[in-house]
Amino acid sequence: MEDLEKKLKIMYTEEQIQNRIKEVAKKIDEDYKGKTVIIISVLKGAIFFTVDLVKKMKTPIILEVMQVSSYQGTQSTGNIIVKKGLDTNIEGKDVLIVEDIIDTGYTLKYLKEYLQSQNPKSLKIAVLADKKERRKADVKVDYTCFEIENKYVVGYGFDVDEIGRNIPYIGYLEEE
Ligand code: IMP
Ligand code: MG
């Protein structure tokens, strides 16, 4: 991991990340006033963001996790599978999906449709990072911490072949 860190440039420091999450948490609290929200954290990358976000929120939450992945082989085909589904009923509930990053949008589009079919009362999306220029599928994101350039990010949940998630800041790999 030290080798990986040497190749990284800092995009957002720990302090910048926490300050921005605090702002987003405040906005979420305003929007969900008087409600309890089911937080669905998308494993594995979003764990880090989820923990910091919910600790900064005052709104009562119920924490759930899901894991999805895209089929290997052809890149970003939009073929998504649910590896770990929900074990709670979200019908009639206020639900907020918390994801690390939206890139092509295929993952969140699939996830949103999948959860929408379970008839929640409301369904919104919060992401740590948005690579807007890469979008292929149309999905509405309700809360975004950072709009980022088309760079591969590592740290604070983001991995390169599963390594680097515990780097405390968001870094990016410079093109070699
Ligand atoms: P999408 O379906 O293309 O929006 O894919 C989103 C998923 O791709 C995220 O949940 C991440 O797992 C992964 N991903 C996209 N960009 C990056 C990145 O820069 N670093 C690490 N993972 C990324
Ligand atoms: Mg992911």
Image (cartoon, grey):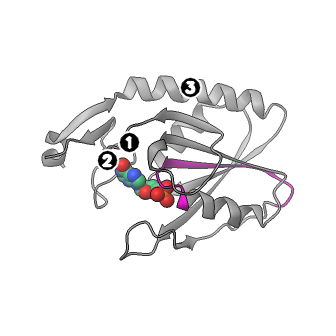
Residue 95 sits inside the magenta stretch: yes
Can residue 58 be seen by looking at this rendering? no
Query: Mark 3: which amino acid?
Result: Lys
Asked whether mark 3 lies closer than 8 Å to ligand 1, one says no
Is residue 131 found left or right of 151 in the rendered image?
right
Is residue 16 found left or right of 176 in the rendered image?
right
The residue lying toward the viewer, choosing from 162 and 139, is 139
| Residue drawn at 62 percent across, 44 percent down | 141
Q: Nearer the viewer, mark 2 or mark 3?
A: 2
Residue 23 sits inside the magenta stretch: no
Is residue 33 found left or right of 50 in the rendered image?
right
Part of the protein shown in magenta: 91-106
Above or below residue 42? Residue 67 is below
Query: Mark 1: which amino acid?
Result: Tyr
Query: Mark 2: which amino acid?
Result: Tyr
Question: Which mark is drawn over residue 152?
Answer: 2
Above or below residue 72? Residue 135 is above
Quadrant holding ligand 1?
A: bottom left
